[in-house]
Amino acid sequence: MSLAGVSLAGAARAEDVGAADTTVEKLKDLSLEDLANLTVTSVSKRSEPLGEAASAIYVITHDDIARSGATSVAEMLRLAPNVQVTQTSASGYVITARGFNGNPGAQSFSNKLLVLIDGRSVYSPLFSGVYWDMQDVLPEDVERIEVISGPGATLWGANAVNGVINIITRATAQTQGGLLDAGVGDHGRQLGLRYGGKVSEDLTWRIYGRAVADNGERTAAGAKAGDEWSRVQGGFRLDWAARPADMITFQGDVFRGSEDEPPAGDENVGGRNLLARWNHTSGSGAELQVTAYYDHAERATEGGGGKFKVNTYNIDAQDSFTLGERQQIVWGGGIRTSQYRISGTPTFFFNPASADLNLANLFAQDTITLAPTVRLTLGLKVEDDPYVKPEPLPNLRLAWSPNGALTLWGAVSKAVRSPTPFDRDVVEKLGPTAPPQLIGDAAFQHEKLTAYEAGARFHPSPLASFSVSAFYNDYDQLRTIELSPGRTLPLVWGNLLEGSTYGLEAWGEVRVQPWWRVSGGVSTLHEDLRFKAGAVGIVGPRQDGEDPKVQASLKSSMDLGRRFTLDGDLRYIGALPDGLAPAYTELNSRLGWNLTDRLQISVSGRNLLHARHVEYPGGEAIQRTVTADLQWRF
């Protein structure tokens, strides 16, 4: 396994994989003990068994995605019990881990979750957070999604505060031949086409195209919300085993979309990216990885509603090796430049409107085997931020695995959210000729977190697997809205909120019968935020998030004979504080029929328990949907 989660030993050799999509069938044959020890890479930036990872990590597998009927990244993430997924409109989502889901109506405030697609960060350097309507992958091309709740800044850098999501796509050897995926429902339609081939036994490739259209949601009163949207995307990937020890990957995507945003008008989104990666494994087992990528993203609201463009150039390298018999070391660094231009409106703009954001980092982490069953991990990252002085990001983790069925772990770590142009340079007015109402703060600092975690992961038998973790997070310098010096207008961003959160996360899976698996999860969250001395307190201490205190899920997966599959996913989301949104329970389900080994039809239903429900304050009412899908492999 490479440092990025791509197999070196067979990623470009179709004969090592067999039929194009046999991975799903193989996973069905594995015991839960085998599944609990799938290889993951996001916790320590090196390959390790899931069962030994000293972190609250959940893995969404390719099989999970295929059986769920999910067609978007956000809906795939509903399968993870350690993240909160909230839909606000037909294309809008707010996704968080361990709280801080943002101020209602301000998606940019949900800013403490780092998201990567094959190692390429999709976290916005302008506003912070993730534009989920700009992230898409062909569901059949996803190998797995590693979801970490808790900080990961020592390895992944600033903004990996409350969690890290790493979406890893399949090697081209696993997607040989053709795939046609067409779906139509009462609220939308989608079409995907992919073809993979090989130039030689060591050089394989694939290309794909995908189109999605949604008819929009309803308002809470039942009227049409007018938020219809559509999107087209295409891309390619090439994997080349240049030598037995060297793997080269080259991939890219391009997309364009349009979303109705009443009353402002259509909002057009677009982007493109290219990524190149070289993995080298030496005879001693050391692994060297070099990754470079370019990413372009843009948004524009018609009728002079404002627009932005940002080009990001990134290169990083890391080396993983064993020192003696007791130490596993990974170290590296990287450089990133983001060049942006924002064309605002007369009442909302940035000063300056364009700039280059330069970032550099160095990190090192050492995992020391103190005893055959005890591992100590020490790590440190230093990141040179474009706005503030470098901040050390340390990490300490201790794991005890007395046997192959149990791992106990604890961790203390630090993370920060870096300032962005939205924090420093924004200007908002009530009217074109009015004085500024809100301005950025040129002295805005890091938002800081010190996290304390402990957990256990155990599989008492090949038929059962469980994970439980508890956390206490101590926050400082969180963003607030303050008066200018002298207690006058305009309002200005500040760092005068602090506090703590704590909670519990647990999930498990049981094989009831060889043909039936049941899994479930629950998470709790308590938030205690308060203003620091000198804060004005214009907006209450809940301004960083209105989060449910509890959420739970229950999933069932059945193989009904050789041809039929039946899956259901029941979720409960607790009420938001202050009565902003009620608790709700919803059910997603899918019935699949494999007519042949190459042809499958399915019917999926989402939000089946209610005609519509509201998930976010001020958001649209999310409707019940039913979709029929056909997949043909050729």
Image: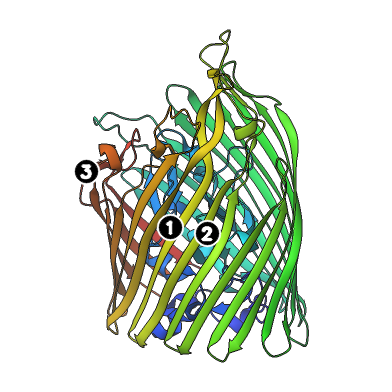
Helix, strand or loop status at disc 2: strand
* Residue 537 percent location from the top left of the image: 43, 30
Foreground tag (3 vs 1): 1
Proximity of marks 3 and 1: CB atoms separated by less than 8 Å: no
Task: Identify which amino acid the numbered label 2 is placed on.
Answer: Ile
Proximity of marks 2 and 1: CB atoms separated by less than 8 Å: yes
Task: Identify which amino acid the numbered label 3 is placed on.
Answer: Ala
- Badge 3 is on which residue? 611
* C-alpha span from label 3 to label 1: 22 Å
Q: Nearer the viewer, residue 187 or 398?
A: 398
Helix, strand or loop status at disc 3: loop
Which image quarter: residue 195?
bottom right
Q: Identify the residue at image location x=33%, y=62%.
A: 602
Task: Identify which amino acid the numbered label 1 is placed on.
Answer: Leu
* Residue 125 percent location from the top left of the image: 64, 42
- Badge 2 is on which residue? 165
- Badge 1 is on which residue? 77
Q: Is residue 522 left or right of residue 337?
A: left
Q: Earlier in the sequence, mark 2 or mark 3?
A: 2
Which image quarter: residue 506?
bottom left
Label 2 Cα crowd, 10 Å radius (few <14 / some 14-19 / many 20+): many
Q: Is residue 44 left or right of residue 110?
A: right
* Residue 244 percent location from the top left of the image: 76, 83
